[in-house]
Amino acid sequence: MADRRLQVFHTVARLLSFTKAADALHMTQPAVTFQVRQLEEYFNTRLFDRTHNRISLTEVGECVFEHAEKIFEQYSELENAVKAMTGDVSGILVLGASTTIAEYMLPALLGDFKDKYPDVRIRLQVSNTDGIVAMVEDNVIDLGVVEAPVSNKSLVVELCKKDQLVAVVPPDHPFAHKPSITPKELFSEPYICREEGSGTREVISDYLEQQAVAMCDLNVVMELGSPESIKGAVEAGMGVTILSKATLHKELELGTLTTITLDPPLERPFSFVHQKQKFRVRAMDELLSFARQYCSDHPLL
């Protein structure tokens, strides 16, 4: 509804990057640059200083940015007020989720949400926890769902549900019939782990530290980027691992993998993370409310 040039400028000014703004707006970088230049021509002055591949706001740019913030807050309040009166919930929401959550939790949640709000279009970006938090910080996505603690105090973090992690071995492994296993026992075997930046890896590392086991002491034979690839490697007898129990329903039914409860048990939070925004579209509020209720109804995966 607002001037497109001002929307593009506001995004570039917020992220201080034409590249990141192009990603956030789903535009090409030349198109973003064109819109900013159009606004600069309109005001007949530069809005950004460009030096050594870095940009900063000029004094006029700072003034335009402050007024743009107020304009978009007013637009958002107007849109939400009208939609509240008409009962309309629509628009585009961009979600981000770490791999385990995107593959094993969100399909059911988003399917139910779409049944209730068919006019809301949802785009999903998948990355590891560090990547999702970075996208929330840069406002590339509206809402992230992550599987590890978030250290950025400027973001809002809400617990969604608990997830249990378990040891995973092939069914013919000597440990397969043990009712439980300690970390030291498990890590006497070749170990397959997630990549750096993975929430699963971070949670396991913290857990091992509490058990006086260092990650550097493990016999890591492979580092892989998804639960599916790790499960395949364990099935092939390349090593053992720790994974979310929610990722293993199919393999347990088929008997291709066996799980063992860790001693002591290991649980982690799945959490929503988003900006402390003064204004946001109604569809975002409805999704958050819906997701909170979904997680309350399904406290464990």
Image: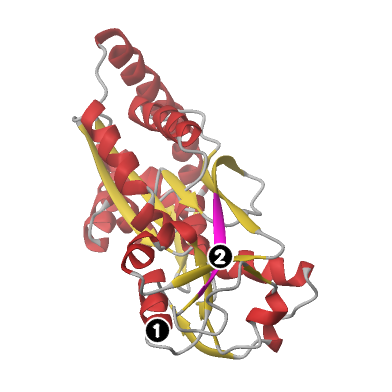
Instruction: Tell me which residue sits at (35%, 19%) in the image.
Output: 80
Relative to 198, residue 162 above or below = above
| Residue closest to the eye, 231 or 79 | 231
Instruction: Tell me which residue sits at (62%, 55%) in the image.
Output: 267
Residue 45 lies in the magenta stretch: no
- Give the labeled residue for mark 1: 233
| Residue closest to the eye, 45 or 19 | 19
Q: Which residues are magenta?
A: 163-168
Q: Badge 2: how crowded within 10 Å, few (<14), some, or many (20+)?
A: many
Looking at the image, tell me whether mark 2 or mark 1 is earlier in sequence order: 2
Quarter placement of the N terminus:
top left
Q: Residue furthest left?
A: 119
The secondary structure that dominates the magenta segment is strand
Q: Is residue 64 left or right of residue 21?
A: right
Q: Position of residue 62 (x, y in %)?
A: 51, 43
Q: Residue furthest front?
A: 177
- Give the labeled residue for mark 2: 166
Q: Position of residue 38 (x, y in %)?
A: 25, 48
| Residue closest to the eye, 59 or 264 | 264
Regarding residue 145, the answer to whether it shows in the image is yes
Q: Position of residue 85 (x, y in %)?
A: 30, 8
Q: Is residue 228 left or right of residue 298?
A: left
Q: Secondary structure at mark 1?
A: helix
| Residue type at tag 1 | Ala
Q: Is residue 171 left or right of residue 82?
A: right
Q: Position of residue 164 (x, y in %)?
A: 56, 55
